[in-house]
Image: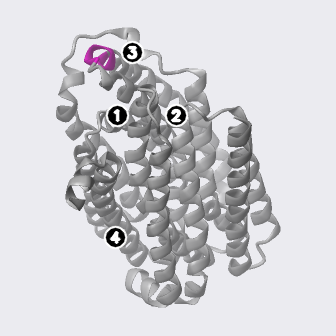
Amino acid sequence: MIFEKIKKNELFRGSLILFILINLGNLINYLYQIVMARMLGPSDYGILAVLVSLTYIFAVPTIAIQTAVSKKIAILNVKKEYSKMNGLFFSFLKKLFIFSLIVFILFAILSFFIIKPLNISFWLLILTGTLIVASFIYPLVAGSLQGMKKFSTLGWNTLLVFFIKIIIAIILVIFGFKVYGAILGFILGMIFGFIFALPYIKEIINAKRDDDGTKILTKENSLIFCAILVFVFMYSIDVILARVFFSSEIAGQYAVLSTIGKMILFSTMPIGNAMFPISAERHYAKTKTSGIIKKASLYVFMLCATAIAIFIIFPELIIKLLFGNQYLEIAGLLPYLGIAFSLIAFLNILILYRISTDEFNLSHLFLIILFLVIEIILLFLFNADIKQFTFAFMFSTIITFIGAFIFVRKWKKSA
């Protein structure tokens, strides 16, 4: 009886599939971080951590486009309108490729101005910048798979991207390419992920084109892009500012701390990825969606509570096993970052749900921008040492969580 209910529970089934496969990918990704930290050492790993944080910002188009494409595909998938999906896919592919090249050129110009404060090679920044093109193109296949609720394929494809990344990175670092080799793994992993996903959306690729489905660059999707941009800054700005405020050694140590903390956030993201197309479809079909956000929040809470408990009980063991003895002195701060990224994980679920049900508006965007500004101000005011900096980051996420919770409750009452 219980297994029958689980089988019929679309959110649980989709979440479980994505949770297992994507978190296997995340496990490989963190293995990448661990291996790179050990092979490169604190100083070079500090540089890699900043570049990885930049890739999170480059990933804003990936997340935003994937979210927008997934929502549109989910709606079209209700009536199996593959011709409109085809028009959306290829029209957007052309536009995004051209736009990504323009953004890459702008980033290349910007690189001249950030070399000095970040103390990173210009050519290393340019190589990292090439991820912009991949970050604009890959979400088309990922969003299509997500919108068609092909969760298993999406999970396996994500796993493939991470696997290719770590294999190529390790080989290149061994051969002396250091941080350059680590970044090349990122780029090639995403390229191969795009290519290998195409056969699994053949219903879209092979359909006759109907350009009525291509209207995706709308005011609503502009809000989606801005919201995700702010959200990504929320969970990546700490490592970038640590690089500015602290020495390479200390910044590298904080990068390890933040990397472990982000395990909580990234491990809960598959739940949001499964929830999103399901709630979008139900909203489009005018059926009740409130149960979906409640279940998703419960799943997130269970994962976060478990992770925080492990961080509190075994902080030194976790860091020693993953990154080695050279990072042990910051072990006591791990639970605080666990709390911070858990609260950010809840914010992610809330934002995705509001977007999927067409309830995310300009006032919500201004609110999360305000929270980001508060976070940056606190990090600028309290950076005398790594402990103070960590507490400032945690308190900023507490303010964000409480503020978002109060705002949403008031908004629901007035609706």
The secondary structure that dominates the magenta segment is: helix
Sequence order check, earlier mark of 4 and 1: 4
Q: How many marks?
A: 4
**Disc 4 and disc 1 in contact, CB within 8 angstroms:** no
**Residue 331 horizontal side relative to residue 9, left or right:** right
Q: Are marks 4 and 3 in contact (CB under 8 Å)?
A: no
Which of disc 2 and disc 1 is earlier in sequence?
1
User: Marks 3 and 1, how far apart in space?
Assistant: 14 Å
Distance from Cα at disc 4 to Cα at disc 3: 40 Å
Left or right: 245, with 173 as reference point: right
Residue at coordinates 39% horizontally, 37% vertically from top-left? 277
Label 4 and label 2: CA atoms lie apart by 36 Å
User: Looking at numbered disc 3 in the image, what kind of residue is underneath it?
Assistant: Gly
Of the pair 316 and 68, the residue shown nearer to us:
68
Q: Is residue 132 among the parts visible in the rendering?
A: no
Identify the residue shown where x is 39% and y is 31%. 281
Give the mark nearer the N terminus: 3 vs 1. 1
- Judging by the rendered image, the residue that carries numbered circle 1 is 147
Q: Amino acid at mark 4?
A: Leu
Q: Is residue 82 left or right of residue 413?
A: left
Q: Nearer the viewer, mark 4 or mark 2?
A: 2
Q: Which mark is residue 213?
A: 3
Q: CA distance from mark 4 to mark 1?
A: 29 Å
Quick one: quadrant of the N terminus? bottom left
> Of tags 1 and 2, which is closer to the observer?
2
Q: Residues within 10 Å of mark 3 (few under 14, many from 20)?
A: many
Give the Cα distance between marks 3 and 2.
19 Å
Circle 4: is it few (<14), some (14-19), or many (20+) Cα within 10 Å?
some
**Which amino acid, mark 2?**
Thr
What residue range appears in magenta? 81-86
Mark seen at residue 31: 4
Q: CB atoms at circles 1 and 2 under 8 Å apart?
A: no
